[in-house]
């Protein structure tokens, strides 16, 4: 989909330089940036992604990892 947006000159110039260095089109750079921004600010998507990873990993128990996690959680201020 095509759309028009206003972007501050300094951000546009940085994106333009990045696109050239990365050998990508400006549209690819802006689409990737917006995709990442939306993902970072959509907690449900993050939770869904974490749930998918946990499902793929399964319920493997590793005593070392469990013990290390418990030690770390005890040291963490809540």
Image (tube, grey):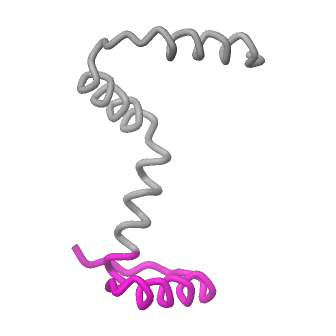
Residue plotted at (39% across, 33% down): 44
Q: In the depicted view, which residue is nearer to us: 50 or 27?
A: 50
Looking at the picture, does residue 64 appear above or below residue 12? above
Residue 51 coordinates in the image, percent (x, y): 33, 25
Q: In the depicted view, which residue is nearer to us: 67 or 24?
A: 67
Q: In the depicted view, which residue is nearer to us: 70 or 17?
A: 70
Looking at the picture, does residue 31 appear above or below residue 78? below
Q: Is residue 12 magenta?
A: yes
User: How many numbered tags mark residues here?
Assistant: 0
Residue plotted at (30% across, 12% down): 59
Residue 73 coordinates in the image, percent (x, y): 66, 14
Q: Is residue 3 magenta?
A: yes
Image quarter hosting the N terminus: bottom left
Q: Is residue 57 left or right of residue 15?
A: left
Residue plotted at (48% across, 83% down): 18
Place residue 33 in its image quadrant.
bottom left
Image quarter hosting the C terminus: top right
Looking at the picture, does residue 23 appear above or below residue 75? below
Q: Which residues are magenta?
A: 1-29
Residue 55 coordinates in the image, percent (x, y): 26, 22
């Amino acid at each position: 989909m095509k759309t028009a947006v206003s972007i501050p000159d300094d951000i546009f110039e940085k994106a333009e330089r990045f696109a050239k260095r990365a050998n990508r089109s400006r549209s690819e750079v802006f689409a990737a940036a917006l995709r990442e921004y939306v993902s970072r600010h959509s907690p449900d998507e993050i939770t869904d992604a974490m749930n998918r990873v946990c499902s793929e990993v399964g319920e493997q128990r590793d005593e070392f990892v469990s013990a290390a996690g418990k030690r770390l959680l005890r040291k963490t201020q809540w």
